[in-house]
Image (spheres, rainbow, N blue to C red):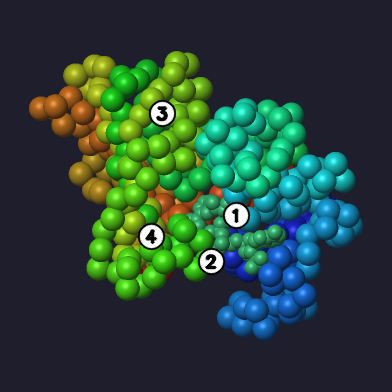
């Protein structure tokens, strides 16, 4: 198979596991390398007995030379700051990279260093050229650029849900650039597989907690693309909340309509038109509101729009599975495009309900 051999680096983490699951039985992509650090040297069946892989491979240290010998494409599903240590060596050797972390989501390295200052102290970087070159992997809005990219920065989970809701309205100049509010909820898997106290069952169960209330890192990521499509600087308010569920993300986006005569039906028609060629995005009828359960384990984003005539507010609700459309599924969409396939090849779009 040419151009379709995939290395998954960070295989044992949540993003890696979802990627491997999605690539099992994929008609046009084959996993040929598993990478990790702590898990390096371990046989897959000992590490992850519930997801058997053909040939029961051993996880290896992701040396770029070894990866390039066995893979054409690499998914990096690593904690922030680590992709930047690996990607340059892979790209130099002809491996095209999809990074699920934030390392290449900003076109300016200086901006990444500002927003991810702790990681920047650990990982000194001089790859400003790669930051400028990387394509932001929001498939529905960047398909052509992704197809020919060497490096794709898959968006974060909150930016994915928020931007899919916002972009059609910003592009058409239908909402005021100031005063946009995003209120979002996510499950505990958003924090990754490594142990963290606030994600313990005893802490997170039966509780809803806001976090990162001012200056969450995803704010600047959302603002970057929102400003680009709006053609002017967008500053918005983004507040995430942790919910007592494993997976799922719901973002409710508020913006002030410029034309108070616009109805929910008008806005819904606009959304439907914007996503008519995007099988991963579905617009629900006006008055039907999405639930995270409706997108569980799928690569789907469900959107619904409402207008409050009294306040002049546009309200767009956006539900995704944070680990699929918000992470690994979007990564596989990018791999599909890099390897000349349709974006949704091999991806689940229907949930097992409930
Ligand atoms: N979780 C989400 O909902 C979500 C959504 C969108 C984007 N993201 C982003 O996706 C990335 C991965 O997130 P995750 O939730 O999948 O994290 P995770 O569950 O903590 O997994 C991280 C993986 O990285 C590996 N790793 C750590 N240090 C390494 C090193 N030095 N060399 C090679 N492998 C190393 C770990 O493997 P070992 O144990 O073998 O070291 C593990 O497999 C993060 O940047 C995150 O921000 C996450």
Q: Position of residue 351 (x, y in %)?
A: 42, 63
- Residue where numbered disc 1 is placed: 79
Q: Position of residue 16 (x, y in %)?
A: 62, 62
Q: CA distance from mark 2 to mark 3?
A: 36 Å
Q: Residue furthest front?
A: 121
Marks 3 and 4 in Cβ contact (< 8 Å): no
- Residue where numbered disc 4 is placed: 187
- Residue where numbered disc 2 is placed: 194
Q: CA distance from mark 1 to mark 3?
A: 31 Å
Which comes sooner in the sequence, label 2 or label 1?
1
Q: CA distance from mark 2 to mark 4?
A: 15 Å
**Residue located at (51% from left, 45% from top):** 156
- The reply to whether the residue tagged 2 has its Cβ within 8 angstroms of ligand 1 is yes
In front: 267, or 142?
A: 142
Which comes sooner in the sequence, label 2 or label 3?
3
Give the answer, above or below, for where 235 lies relative to 222: above
* Disc 3, SS: helix
Q: Name the mark on residue 351.
A: none
């Amino acid at each position: 198979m040419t151009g379709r051999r995939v290395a998954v680096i960070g295989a044992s983490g949540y993003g890696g596991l979802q990627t491997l699951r999605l690539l099992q039985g994929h008609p046009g992509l084959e996993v040929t390398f598993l990478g990790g650090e702590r898990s390096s040297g371990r046989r897959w069946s000992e590490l992850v007995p519930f997801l058997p892989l053909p040939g029961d491979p051993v996880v290896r240290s992701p040396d770029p030379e070894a990866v390039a010998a066995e893979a054409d494409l690499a998914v990096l599903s690593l904690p922030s700051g680590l992709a930047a240590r690996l990607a340059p060596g892979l790209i130099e050797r002809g491996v095209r990279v999809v990074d699920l972390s934030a390392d290449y989501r900003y076109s300016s390295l200086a901006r990444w260093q500002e927003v991810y200052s702790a990681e920047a102290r650990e990982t000194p970087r001089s790859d400003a050229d790669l930051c400028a070159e990387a394509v932001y992997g929001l498939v529905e809005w960047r398909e052509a650029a992704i197809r020919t990219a060497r490096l794709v920065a898959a968006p974060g989970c909150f930016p994915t849900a928020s931007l899919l809701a916002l972009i059609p309205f910003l592009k058409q100049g239908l909402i005021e650039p100031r005063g946009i509010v995003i209120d979002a909820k996510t499950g505990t898997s958003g924090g990754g597989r490594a142990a963290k106290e606030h994600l313990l069952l005893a802490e997170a169960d039966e509780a809803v907690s806001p976090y990162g209330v001012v200056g969450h890192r995803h704010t600047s990521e959302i603002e970057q693309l929102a400003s680009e499509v709006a053609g002017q600087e967008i500053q918005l308010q983004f507040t995430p909340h942790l919910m007592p569920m494993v997976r799922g993300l719901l973002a409710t986006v508020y913006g002030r309509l410029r034309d108070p005569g616009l109805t929910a039906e008008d806005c819904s028609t606009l959304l439907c038109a914007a996503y008519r060629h995007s099988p991963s995005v579905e617009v629900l009828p006006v008055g039907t509101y999405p639930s995270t359960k409706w997108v569980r384990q799928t690569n789907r984003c469900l959107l619904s729009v409402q207008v409050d005539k009294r306040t002049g507010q546009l309200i767009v609700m956006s539900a995704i599975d944070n680990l699929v459309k918000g992470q690994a599924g979007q990564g596989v969409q990018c791999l599909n495009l890099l390897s000349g396939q349709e974006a949704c090849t091999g991806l689940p779009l229907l949930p097992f309900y409930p």
